């Protein structure tokens, strides 16, 4: 969503490919039965707006109209439909652990603190997974920003509550302990016509025991960089350091997944420094390790998701690992045109899948 701060700041083929992928991965699972193989997916599912008109408003009427336009865009991107598409992407490889960003609940109703839920993306995704025969439960939920603003009639309010979520397969023998969540101590605050808004980003972590192996799984969403606000890069780098020195500071093998808003595909981009920061702390990048000569773009489709041709041009979503873990494979999710659904991309990001082997040097 907050890539806006950088700017102002078919289906049948997919099902055939999905069937092939599930069969192939099932075969691989059988050959690795009893070993420490774990499958992971990270996906920024997109809350449905970039808030461009809101952040760019120069007058209060423009701000009110921006809120209306943002809500209109959320509706146009059809979150329930997209959550079904993302559930399908999860079903393709049936990862053991899923890290999700921008899992947003939208409420619209009279007065401040509206109670009527327009879209609950987590529940919509869980319902879609269940309908597709997939067994997943939320293990950890970390809440980010919670913002609300009036519509032009000044009586109807819109509220957006952002969350990052760890899902896990409930039909696998996975055991969880030591769940942790926290906002970063360094955050960005931006002025708006209804007062300053802090863009709360954070992390969630859980220790996972499976097939006689243990590791720590961490998810996050870092502050985007806005060239016109250099402090945003400093915030992003500080958040990455806090991540490594906080939840990743363990003797366990560690997997960190999420939207880092740091472009690994363009070394001249200022945010490449954040990517290099993670590498300097001893982390390896699952995509780079398994696709050393492929760009693997993950961001970003146009805000309304209706573009016919993919506009992915950055690689900012990662599955990092450190310790006794070896990557076996990595793939993108919903990066190809045939993976659109009813003319929409499932998200403005592509997801990243990885299969890793724990317990090896």
Image (cartoon, rainbow, N blue to C red):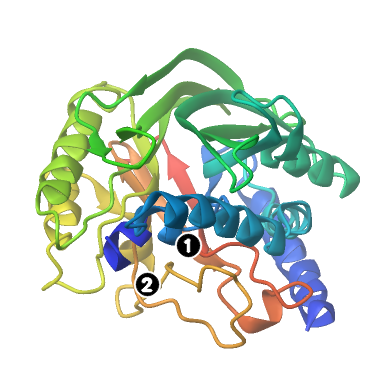
Query: Circle 2: is it few (<14), some (14-19), or many (20+) Cα within 10 Å?
Result: some
Along the viewing direction, whichever of 356 and 194 lies nearer the viewer: 194
Image coordinates for residue 309, horizontal then vertical, percent = 56, 88
Is residue 354 visible from the viewing direction of this image? no
Using the rendered view, name the quadrant where residue 57 is placed.
bottom left
Image coordinates for residue 191, horizontal then vertical, percent = 27, 41
| Residue name at image x 48 percent, y 26 percent | 143
Q: CA distance from mark 2 to mark 1?
A: 8 Å
Image coordinates for residue 140, horizontal then vertical, percent = 55, 23
Secondary structure beneath dot 1 equals strand
Using the rendered view, name the quadrant where residue 210 is placed.
top right
Image coordinates for residue 270, horizontal then vertical, percent = 12, 63
Residue situated furthest top in the rendering = 178
Q: Which mark is residue 275?
A: none
Along the viewing direction, whichever of 302 and 192 lies nearer the viewer: 192
Q: Quadrant of the N terminus?
A: bottom left
- The residue labelled by disc 1 is 330
* Horizontal side of residue 267 vs 205, given as left or right: left
The mark total stands at 2
Is residue 184 visible from the viewing direction of this image? yes
Query: Circle 1: is it few (<14), some (14-19), or many (20+) Cα within 10 Å?
Result: many
Disc 2 to disc 1: CB gap under 8 Å: yes
Residue situated furthest bottom in the rendering = 309
Along the viewing direction, whichever of 130 and 232 lies nearer the viewer: 232
């Amino acid at each position: 969503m907050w890539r806006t701060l950088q700017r102002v700041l078919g289906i049948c083929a997919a099902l055939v490919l999905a069937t092939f992928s599930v069969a192939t991965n099932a075969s691989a699972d059988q050959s690795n039965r009893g070993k420490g193989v774990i499958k992971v997916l990270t996906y920024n599912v997109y809350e449905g707006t970039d808030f461009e008109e809101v952040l760019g408003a120069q007058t209060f009427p423009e701000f009110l109209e921006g809120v209306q336009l943002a809500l209109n865009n959320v509706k146009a991107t059809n979150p329930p439909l997209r959550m079904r598409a993302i559930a399908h992407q999860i079903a393709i490889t049936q990862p053991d652990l899923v890290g999700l960003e921008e899992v947003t609940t939208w409420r619209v109703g009279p007065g401040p603190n509206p109670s009527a839920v327009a879209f609950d993306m987590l529940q919509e995704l869980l319902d879609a997974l269940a309908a597709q025969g997939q067994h997943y439960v939320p293990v950890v939920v970390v809440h980010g920003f919670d913002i609300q603003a009036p519509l032009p009639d000044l009586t109807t309010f819109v509220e957006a509550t952002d969350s990052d979520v760890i899902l896990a397969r409930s039909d696998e023998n996975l055991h969880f302990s030591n769940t942790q969540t926290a906002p970063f101590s360094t955050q960005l605050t931006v002025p708006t016509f209804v007062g300053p808004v802090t863009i709360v980003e954070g992390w969630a972590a859980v220790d996972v025991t499976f097939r006689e192996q243990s590791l720590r799984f961490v998810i996050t969403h870092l502050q985007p960089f806005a060239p016109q606000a250099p402090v945003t890069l400093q915030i992003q780098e500080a958040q990455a350091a806090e991540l490594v020195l906080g939840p990743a500071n363990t003797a366990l093998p560690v997997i960190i997944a999420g939207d880092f808003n740091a472009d690994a595909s363009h070394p001249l981009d200022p945010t490449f420094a954040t990517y290099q920061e993670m590498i300097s702390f001893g982390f390896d990048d699952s995509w780079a390790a398994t696709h050393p000569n492929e760009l693997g773009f993950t961001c970003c489709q146009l805000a309304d998701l209706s573009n016919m041709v993919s506009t992915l041009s950055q690689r900012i979503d990662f599955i990092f690992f450190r310790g006794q873990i070896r990557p076996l494979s990595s793939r993108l999710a919903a990066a190809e045109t045939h993976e659109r659904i009813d003319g929409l991309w499932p998200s403005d990001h592509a997801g990243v899948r990885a299969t890793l082997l724990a317990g090896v040097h």
